[in-house]
Amino acid sequence: MNTQWKLVPVEPTETMVINGFESEPDECFTDEEVWEQYQEMSGCQQAAFRAKLCWAAMINSAPASSEADAQPVMKLEAEKLWGGHGEYAVSFVRAGWLDECRATGGEFLLYTHPDEGKVARLTAERDALQQRLNAADQRIDELTAEPRVESVCRGSAALGTACGKCARCASLRLAASVKRADEKIPGMIATACGNFAIMIDKSNSHYGWTFRHHPDGMWVSGRLATEAEMNAARAHAKILALL
């Protein structure tokens, strides 16, 4: 009987289960010599043989235990007893561990492998703390993130009709130069209803364009005005000048 030992999970993993049932002898995949020996066995012998193969496959595919990550705190060195006599010595591997124990007090048990219950509890506490930290980080990001602007206006920087809030205005830094619709724009002649206007100032880059008064209070450029519309706007401007 093999005297080797191995720590395995109480509940087998999916990989262990798959490797376990796939270890059963098969005429197509099992070595020919092994298959012949298996065929010559009795029913009980075949069952025992399958159990051993399944056990070995599951053990070999079991995940590594946390024993490899454990850090020893003490070391016991003992001589082999001869006639009931032998020397032994105990030393601390991790410096300061004894002081830590004395600072808190209590009973401390030393295991040859980590206590599974304690490891599970500490792991759960660590995961819960990590979730709280992740939630706090996400909340901080939400509070410190700059507001995202989705809409884009069609206002003009030259006319001062840009909204100053959309992505285009923010990129051009036009917010400081925004003019409200109720402010008079030189060269823009509005209709009597106040919903439409035409730019007749030749020095303006939007000369000859029509504008519509948007419900949000901004002037939005539309199309080039016709010659008749331009003449009417100029005539209206002359009348306004006389008032």
Image (cartoon, rainbow, N blue to C red):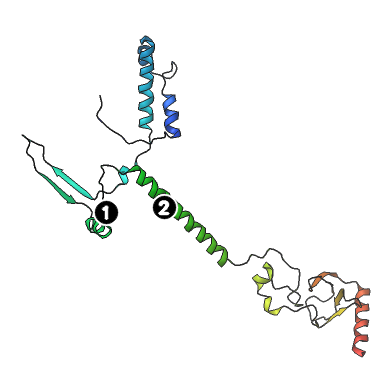
146 over 232 or under it: above or below: above
Q: Secondary structure at mark 1?
A: loop
- In the image, residue 215 sits, relative to residue 55, either above or below, namely below
Q: Which residue, given by chain and number where applicable, does mark 1 sit on?
A: 106
Between 148 and 154, which is closer to the camera in this rendering? Answer: 148
Q: Position of residue 68 (x, y in %)?
A: 30, 43
Residue sitting at x 36%, y 9%: 40
Lower position in the chain sequence, tag 2 or tag 1: 1
Residue 32 visible somewhere in the drawing: no
Q: Quadrant of residue 49?
A: top left
**Nearest the camera: 120 or 168?**
120
| 196 displayed left or right of 39 | right
- Judged by depth in the image, the label closer to the viewer, 2 or 1, is 1
Q: Position of residue 107 (x, y in %)?
A: 26, 51
Q: CA distance from mark 2 to mark 1?
A: 23 Å
Looking at the picture, does residue 136 appear above or below residue 9?
below
